[in-house]
Image (tube, helix red, strand yellow):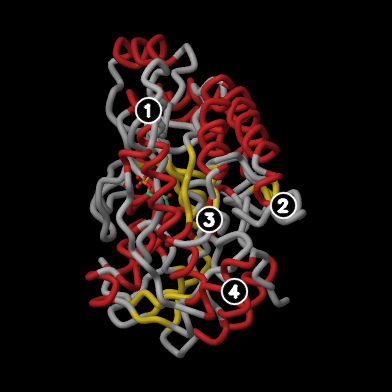
Amino acid sequence: MVYIPSDPFTQNAIASKAQNFMSIDTASISTTSELAAIPFNNPLVTGRELEYVRAALSSKHIAGDGPFTKQCQAWLQQLIGCQSTLLTHSCTAALEMAALLADVQPGDEVILPSYTFVSTANAFVLRGAVPVFVDIRPDTLNLDETKVEAAITEKTKVIVPVHYAGVSCEMDTLSAIADTYNLLVVEDAAQGITSSYKGRPVGSLGHLAAFSFHETKNVVCGEGGALAINNASLKERAEILREKGTNRSKFFRGEVDKYTWVDVGSSFLPSDILAAVLLAQFEQSDYIMHQRMAIWNLYHQAFADLEQQGKLRRPIVPAECQHNAHLYYLLVEDLKVRTELLAYLKQREIKSTFHYVPLHSSPAGMKYGRVSGTMTFTEDLSDRIARLPLGAAMTLAEAKQVIEAVLDFFQSK
Ligand SMILES: *Cc1c(COP(=O)(O)O)cnc(C)c1O
């Protein structure tokens, strides 16, 4: 499949890579100080978090793998329909576990987008692997599956699709490539909880998947994550790696009469106090998603006219993907307009922000990784993206305030 850039700016940017950095005249921007500031991220405390934390504290089981952890894992396993899930203290930790389970060796290669969070690459770099960066699709900003095969060498071991904004990658194509070349697929599902692809939950699509419950994600416990395991053969080793390389999990289940050091490992499990917070969030996840979706849809409708007028491009969600309203972004004409827009919103006390600095252009990315093919869309789109405030605790009135500010900004364009 070929993806045609769906907005005129991409084509312009490809035609002329020259970009003008102009300073912004903030004096001409009016402030509306009577309105309260709107934070970029506004996580919701759903109600039972403290009650569950109290219960965890009084149970005397506050280390990992207590009753709340077990309930969270059961909830996730049911949601995803996977072999097993293990709570971790972050998505980064879950990705590091995936890198250990993939058994990548120094010099092995891992295919991933450059347009992602550092942990997607770092988890594998820690094992001495080489991240091989592939360009993104202009519609979803996800790994371009049509460019993956060209990046494969004899050293390739893993493909890491990142479901950006909770919109799934083109997983059927990626899985077929992985099957052909005998590669492991590790989904970076940090942003993808409750999303699906062709009716199948994100997290069930690769061999392994890593989720995040960091405060900036949809369902949160401050810092937290989970590894979903879809291959029965990886399940036992995953438990061992997470428990400092011991078979302690087996011991607790009564399957062995003492536990001992059996493999490499580390401590990847969160305290049950955090799992208590997470369970309260899981129980309210429908409400959280509903709130986020209401704002996402409001934004999407409100900016349709600006898109029609060619002033910006809205997010594109392919028909086979059900997303989770993880983030709302606008793609504007160029870096100059993006800088002006963010400054304008800041003047109106609205926290809006850009996103990833492409990893291939970062100091560590240049040192540890290499690029396959061109980075045309990665470089173009990362300069033009502006993310708007979105959170389950955000009100529709706040969303309207953001919409008004964006419309006012483009009035002058
Ligand atoms: C947030 C995020 C991570 C890291 O999650 P932590 O839980 O903070 O470790 C990794 N990958 C992507 C794509 C993310 O958005």
Q: CA distance from mark 1 to mark 4?
A: 35 Å
Q: Could you say which is closer to the camera, residue 85 or residue 90?
A: 90
Q: Is residue 101 visible?
A: yes
Q: Earlier in the sequence, mark 2 or mark 3?
A: 2
Q: Earlier in the sequence, mark 1 or mark 4?
A: 4
Looking at the picture, which amino acid does disc 2 mark? Gln
- Residue 220, relative to residue 229: is it above or below? above
- Name the mark on residue 332: 3
- Judged left or right of residue 125, residue 293 is right
For image coordinates 32% across by 72% down, the residue present is 361
Judged by depth in the image, the label closer to the viewer, 2 or 1, is: 1
Q: Which residue is mark 4?
A: 11
Q: Are marks 4 and 2 in contact (CB under 8 Å)?
A: no
- Residue 96, relative to residue 218: is it above or below? below
Quadrant in the picture for residue 238:
bottom left
For image coordinates 35% across by 73% down, the residue present is 360
10 Å crowding of disc 3: few (<14), some (14-19), many (20+): many
Q: Which residue is mark 2?
A: 308
